[in-house]
Amino acid sequence: AALAADLRLAWRHQQFELDYQPQVDVNGRMTGAEALLRWQHPQRGRVPPDQFIPTAEETTLILTIGRWVLDRACEQLAAWSRRSDRSHLSISVNVSARQFRHPEFVDEVMDAIARSGVAPNKLKLELTESLLADGFDITVNKMGSLKRMGVALSLDDFGKGYSSLAYLKRLPLDQLKIDREFVKDVLTDANDAAIARTIIGLAQSLHLQVVAEGVETEEQREFLAQHGCDGFQGYLFCRPMSIERLEEFIEANL
Ligand code: G
Ligand code: G
Ligand code: MN
Ligand code: NA
């Protein structure tokens, strides 16, 4: 309850910020970035999202924050679209189950895109397998509406949840993200290596792009790339950082 009250104050005092973490292709070229929410608390410092998003989800604040994140991401995409050396970049936005479930969600995405004037395919929504608990047909229909709008859809934290392969086939996805849990020990744990390879193979047979998160070493990147992974994100390339620092990273890596 105390945290919920603190979060409302945080919203009122504009203590939320977005960091961005670059994503790169097999050639090391940046293809886009994931927007990651941060709470800059005057006393507690920077509070990581896993410590406040669950509470925000218990209140309607997640809807307010979620709209703000979408708007910010679209504004950033609009700024990049006006520069020829950045117009290819995409931004991935995490969408919580409660936010996705809200009846207005599809309209809100449409509004954010319309207001900013960005190409819809530059916006990627990261959904999690927990959405499937809501009822499969509703989820698929909503995803279909977003797809028809041209927005890209990614399944985040893949492998941690419980989505069956039969379900996966029917979801209108563009991308799977291999959870960092499986990437961490991919070189030393035969089971994790098998899981990572299986996810990559699955993505390939479903014609989905596959991005590994939490890539920290060149050896991990190499292993994943050899098995067909086409996108990478992690400390090896870059930590999540402010938009100002990200702009410097982009300049240095053009
Ligand atoms: O940046 P960090 O690794 O601490 O993020 C932890 C998790 O918090 C991410 O995996 C992501 O699922 C979640 N997260 C980050 N930003 C957002 C956001 O804007 N909205 C939602 N719903 N979740 C987010
Ligand atoms: O959406 P998701 O919860 O997966 O967000 C990714 C989270 O993983 C972010 O909170 C980010 O800070 C964190 N992260 C990003 N790259 C790395 C990495 O290379 N190693 C570790 N341990 N965490 C990472
Ligand atoms: Mn994510
Ligand atoms: Na993730």
Image (cartoon, rainbow, N blue to C red):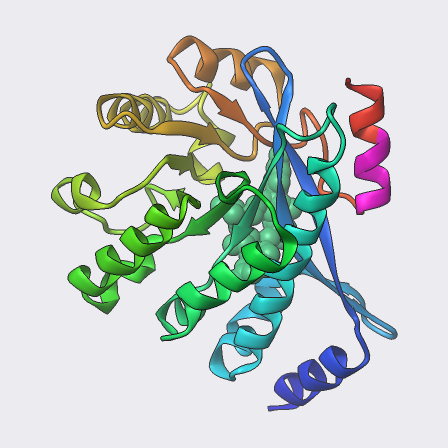
On screen, residue 6 above or below 133: below
- Ligand 1 image position (quadrant): bottom right
132 left or right of 29 in image: left
Q: Looking at the image, which residue is at 76% across and 31% down?
A: 83
Q: Looking at the image, which residue is at 50% across and 24% down?
A: 231
Q: Looking at the image, which residue is at 78% across and 27% down?
A: 250
Q: Position of residue 46 (x, y in %)?
A: 78, 62
As rendered, which of 220 and 200 lies closer to the eye? 200
As rendered, which of 145 and 28 lies closer to the eye? 145
Q: Position of residue 64 (x, y in %)?
A: 59, 76
On screen, residue 79 above or below 32: below
On screen, residue 18 above or below 65: above
Q: Main secondary structure of the magenta part?
A: helix
Q: Which residues are magenta?
A: 243-248
On screen, residue 20 above or below 26: below
219 left or right of 138 in image: right
Does the rendering let one see residue 36? no
As rendered, which of 14 and 52 lies closer to the eye? 14
Whether residue 246 appears in magenta in the rendering, the answer is yes
Task: Count the numbered circles shown.
Answer: 0
Does the rendering let one see residue 202? yes
As rendered, which of 147 and 14 lies closer to the eye? 147
